[in-house]
Amino acid sequence: MLQALNLGRAALDRKRGTVRGLRRENRAAVLWSLYFSQPGTRQDLSAATGLSPASVTNVVRELLDEGIVIEAGSVDSDGGRPRIMLKVNPEHGYVIGVDIGETRVRVELFDLTMRERGKADYPLNPREHDVDVVVERITSGLNAVLTDSGTEPAAVLGVGVGVPGIIEQGPEVLVHGQTYGWDAVPLGRLLRAGTDLPLHFENGAKTMGQAELWFGAGRGARNAVVALIGSGVGASLISGGATYRGATSSAAEWGHTTIMVNGRRCRCGSAGCLEAYVGAEAILERYGRPAAGNDEESALAALIGAADASPLAAAILEETADYLGAGIANLINLFNPERVILGGWAGLLLGGRLLPAIRESARRHSLRPPFAAASLELGRLGPEAVALGAATLPIERFLNGSPR
């Protein structure tokens, strides 16, 4: 419950000093609290938010009238009338999450309880990310999930898009993705030519981090790092219970920190980046068996499966665990997190076999006190966490009471 209130406070643009601002703040506090601890009673909400019973009653009345909240049965009270349980109405609206990944574009439709109502997947060549192709895949996916689920566009609160690289939030959204060959791509404008749905953009590693923070291995953490390993490498920093974005939303480009001076050439154009050693594409290149066609996931799984019989595969994995542990140690030494969460499709594959070796490497390369304070674990939401996290972007605005 406390984390839910911290998330709400971190996200809410408070407007104190006016009656309207106070009502909006009270409404957001009740919605955030109920969303993460539903079902709950009015009394639960008053205790959790610190609002008076009268204030909670007024807010709940509005939410019931608008159909945002519905009653969900009752519980007995000590000697009094039964207390009505409340929950967010899952069908009050819908949200969509989009993951622009290295090997696919994934589009998922969720109701307000984040239950999946529709999904569309489109493959991408990991070495070719033409902007027009990606935009076509996204707009096709949006149309597909709405049509297949029978959802009207007017019922969609918004679309969150997890993108590769750095997001420049200015008069128009620009995406800088060096590994994709994207330089100031006006992705928002390009997508709006094919859809009228409200669009929200964030780096894909950060959307995965927010998904794990809200629903997965990051729940309850105040300070954590969520590491995404796919073809490329990224991370999300959780500080004070909320995602840390930095001055220009480019914080935690962890994959492009230097792990070896004058080392392997990275896709970003630099040399010695962590991504050039632990990204799936780089691992397969070092193994000497790059993915046939576009299927890096099967190729990496085959490498891991061959390690018991192949000395070369075993050596590549051992080296990868060492580099990855050293990279995680850098995060531990720099940010002193209480939790490091390893995710992304490649991170989950590697961690399933190598987590003890990765943890041992992190121990060797970390200072003792911050390492002792940090746990290292696998993400719990699977490879679809980026799209799920992207869908939390419009949910966040909804809970704060912002218009679409």
Image (cartoon, rainbow, N blue to C red):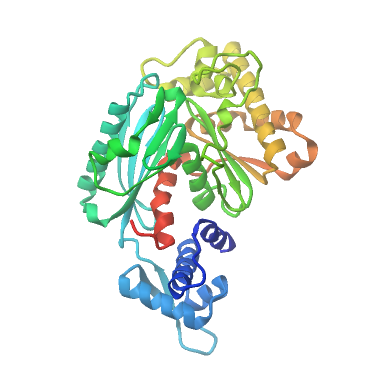
Give left or right: position of 297 versus 320.
left
Q: Residue 183, position in %: x, y? A: 41, 26
Give left or right: position of 264 versus 147.
right
Image quarter of residue 69: bottom left
Q: Residue at x 52, y 39 (%)?
A: 248
Q: Residue at x 44, y 69 (%)?
A: 24
Q: Residue 125, position in %: x, y? A: 35, 21
What residue occupies the far bottom of the structure in this picture? 79
Residue sitting nearer the eye, 383 or 13: 13
Residue sitting nearer the eye, 343 or 9: 9
Residue 185, placed above or below residue 387: above
Residue 321, placed above or below residue 200: above
Tell me how many marks there are: 0
Asked if residue 76 shows in the view, the reply is no
Residue 325, placed above or below residue 269: below
Q: Residue 347, position in %: x, y? A: 53, 31
Image quarter of residue 297: top left
- Quadrant containing the N terminus is bottom right
Asked if residue 363 shows in the view, the reply is yes
Q: Residue 154, position in %: x, y? A: 23, 55
- Quadrant containing the C terminus is bottom left
Residue sitting nearer the eye, 191 or 275: 191
Residue sitting nearer the eye, 354 or 337: 337
What residue occupies the far top of the structure in this picture? 288
Residue 110, placed above or below residue 403: above
